[in-house]
Image (cartoon, rainbow, N blue to C red):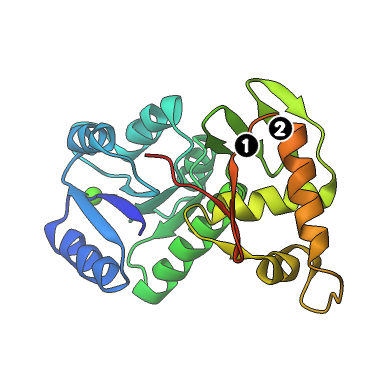
Amino acid sequence: MYNILVVEDEQDIREILKNYLTDQGYQVVLAEDGLEGIAEFHRKSFDLVLLDIMLPKIDGFGVCELIRRESEVPVIMLTALDEESDQIRGFDLKADDYVTKPFSMPVLLRKIAAVLRRTQKEEEHPVIVYRSLVMDPAGHHVYVQGEEADLTQKEFEMLHVLLLNKGLVLTRQKLLNMVWGEDYYGEERIVDTHIKNIRKKLGMNVISTIRGVGYRIDKEN
Ligand code: CA
C-alpha cells in the first residue's frame, strides 16, 4: 500500500483529497501548513507528496526544497497559480509533476498513478540480503561475505527464485517452469545439478533439500 502525504491549507480540498485517495486504497496523512508538512514527512516514510504551493509558514517551494535535500520521494505540486514561471520553479526544485487548481480528481489520480509507476520501477528488482549473502538482481551479482560468487545465468535465476519464495518448497518441476520456461522438456535432474553447483559456488548451504519434494530456502528468524 502506498503512503501519500497531502500538504494543503484549504480544509475542503484537504478533505476531498483524503476521501478520494483513501477510496483508491492509498494511505493518507494530512498536513495544514508547510511546517506541519515537514514534520509529518520526518515522522514516517512516504511514497508520494502532494504539495500545495500557497501555504502558511513555509510555502510549497520551500517545503519541496527541504524535502529534496534528503529525499527523492516523488512530489506533485498543487496550486492555483498557473503562471509558467511558477511551474518552471516547481520543476527546478525537482517536483515530479504539477497540477493547477481547480483540478479534476480523475486527472490527478492518473497523474499520481503515473508518477508512482515511474518512480517505483527501479525498485522492481530490489537487492536481497540473506544471512551473509547479498544478491543484486539488477546488476546480476551475488556476494557471499563480500566476495562475488560466479554463477551462470540459470544458477543465478534459480537462486533468485528460491530467495523470492523463502519458506516455500519449490518442486523440481516448478523450478524448471520458473527458470527454463513452461515449454522446456528436459530432465528434472538438471535442477539437482544446478543446485549442487550453486551450493559449491556459494560455499554456504542456504538451500535445503526436501526429500521427494524439492528445494527450499528457509525464512530468516
Ligand atoms: Ca493554499
Q: Secondary structure at mark 1?
A: loop
Q: Residues within 10 Å of mark 1 (few under 14, many from 20)?
A: few
Tag count: 2
Please state the horizontal and vertical placement of residue 57, each as a whole percent of the image: 18, 32
Q: Residue at x 26, y 71 (%)?
A: 20
Quickly name the residue at label 1.
Answer: 205
Q: Within the image, what quadrant is residue 65 found in?
A: top left
Q: Residues within 10 Å of mark 2 (few under 14, many from 20)?
A: some
Residue 202: image tag: 2
Is residue 27 shown left or right of residue 104?
A: left
Please state the horizontal and vertical placement of residue 42, each as a whole percent of the image: 27, 31
Is the Cβ of the residue at disc 1 closer than 8 Å to that at disc 2? yes
User: In this view, which residue lies farthest toward the top?
Assistant: 146
Q: CA distance from mark 1 to mark 2?
A: 7 Å
Give whichever of 40, 66 is nearer the camera.
40
On whether ligand 1 comes within 8 Å of the CB at mark 1, the answer is: no
Amino acid type, mark 1: Asn
Please state the horizontal and vertical placement of residue 163, each as a whole percent of the image: 58, 49
Residue 78: image tag: none
Amino acid type, mark 2: Leu
Can residue 93 be seen here? The reply is yes
